[in-house]
Image: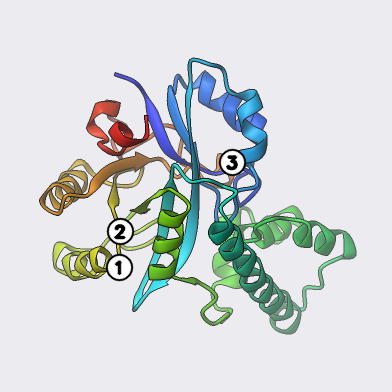
Amino acid sequence: MAKFDLHLHSNNSDGSASVKELVETVIKSGIKIFALTDHDTVKGISNIEQFIPAEIKFIKGVELTCKTLDIKCHILGYGINPDSKDLTDLIELGKKLRRQKLETRITYLKDVWNIDLTKEELDWLYSRPSVVKTHLANILVNRGLSDNNVDAMKKYLDDCKTGNTKFDGEAAIETIKKAGGIPVWAHPLGGEGEKHLTKEDFLPKLRTMIECGIQGLECYYSRYSILEIEFLIKCAQENNLFISGGSDWHGTNKTVPIGRLNADDIQIDSTNATLLNLLL
């Protein structure tokens, strides 16, 4: 049973670990197959391979923040060419969209909460390849304004209206394919802190995502029960979709342990993830 985790984040997006620290954690955890899937950036891919021992399989990935019609979703791209012009152009657009969102949130903190960020804090935010709400929350925690980044986001940032700065889902899926990758719907029943979709709510969304070109589902996920996982696997099999799985590990920025692929922490054999049959 080869241990795998196809949904990991480094500090190139909103994880806490450098790519070197991520690989060290992978090794200590006994994971034999993993993917780096940072939000809207592929910067870490060029730096990580030097740290990976020969016995561990690495898959190049990305996670794109999207909106497909009325569906807010994250699309994972696996086996991508990170130098693809279509992908790098989309990522550059993403940087501009995230910069707009960041500026809106900075203004919100100042106007609503009377919190002015220092030059050092701003320089750190602007230097990052992919800035998300977690980064601002961590600054607030470091200032002693909250005990943790989840509470900081809820109190200081969740009511800030930033408008739609997400990629078009269909365009993101097509871009992943042009980059030689396989587009997979991340945590399709709902991600961290989100209410999980019922079968009745999920199935119409699945039809839409299939029509837009999705090729796989992240069936194994750290926050999903075995019943939810079995339901997603059935959906994937009935629609000829690849089965994937990941913890959505963010280091200390989330409580989920690396390698955890279900809420009960039952070991999952890599042969159950049909996506790997194509990628390895």
Mark 3–mark 1 Cα distance, whole angstroms, equals: 34 Å
Left or right, 108 with respect to 252, comes to right
Q: Earlier in the sequence, mark 3 or mark 1?
A: 1
Q: Is residue 125 above or below residue 34?
A: below
Q: Earlier in the sequence, mark 2 or mark 3?
A: 2
Mark 2–mark 1 Cα distance, whole angstroms, equals: 6 Å
Quarter holding the N terminus? top left
Q: Determine the secondary structure under disc 3.
A: helix
Q: Determine the secondary structure under disc 1.
A: loop
Q: Determine the secondary structure under disc 2.
A: loop
Q: Which mark is residue 249?
A: none
Q: Residue at x 37, y 24 (%)?
A: 3
Question: To which quarter of the image does residue 197 belong?
Answer: bottom left
Between marks 2 and 3 in the image, the one whose residue lies nearer the viewer: 2
The spot of residue 160 in percent (x, y) is 58, 79
Q: Residue at x 38, y 69 (%)?
A: 170
The spot of residue 240 in percent (x, y) is 16, 49
Q: Which mark is residue 252?
A: 3
Per the image, the residue denoted by label 1 is 212
